[in-house]
Image (spheres, rainbow, N blue to C red):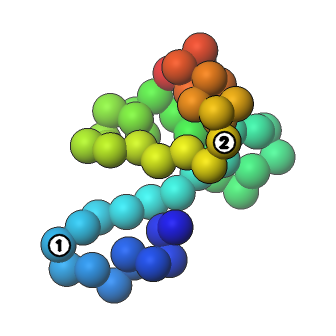
């Protein structure tokens, strides 16, 4: 999803994963930075709610 909006002048986007092997993992500061956070699966949302 990030690549779809990377060139937007109106949005700042970044992506991160929820598992430790992800290139970049989501941290609490990422969630605080975001106005909106999108997840692909419900289990990702559950992980974020539990950890952040």
**Residue 4 vertical position relative to residue 11 in the rendered view, above or below:** below
**Residue 45 vertical position relative to residue 2 in the rendered view, above or below:** above
Q: Residue furthest front?
A: 42
Mark 2 burial class by Cα count in 10 Å: few <14, some 14-19, many 20+: few
Residue 25 position, x and y percent, is: 64, 43
Q: Secondary structure at mark 2?
A: loop
Residue 52 position, x and y percent, is: 50, 21
Residue nearest the observer in this picture, 45 or 24: 45
Left or right for 22, reference 8: right
Q: Nearer the viewer, mark 2 or mark 1?
A: 2
The residue shown at (75%, 50%) is 22
Question: How many angstroms separate mark 2 from mark 1 (CA)?
Answer: 26 Å
Q: Secondary structure at mark 1?
A: loop
Mark 2 or 1, nearer chain start: 1
> Residue 52 got which mark?
none
**Residue 10 vertical position relative to residue 14 in the rendered view, above or below:** below
Left or right for 19, reference 1: right
Q: Name the residue tied to disc 2.
A: 41
> Residue 10 got which mark?
1
Residue 9 position, x and y percent, is: 19, 80
The residue shown at (65%, 25%) is 47
Q: Residue furthest bottom?
A: 7
Quarter of the image for residue 45 reads top right
Left or right for 11, reference 32: left
Q: Residue furthest top?
A: 50
Quarter of the image for residue 18 reads top right
Q: How many marks?
A: 2
Left or right for 42, reference 7: right
């Amino acid at each position: 999803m990030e690549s779809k909006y990377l060139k937007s002048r109106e949005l700042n986007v970044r992506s991160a994963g929820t598992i430790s092997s992800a290139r970049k993992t989501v941290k609490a500061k990422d969630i605080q930075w975001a106005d909106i956070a999108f997840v692909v699966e419900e289990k990702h949302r559950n992980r974020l709610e539990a950890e952040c």
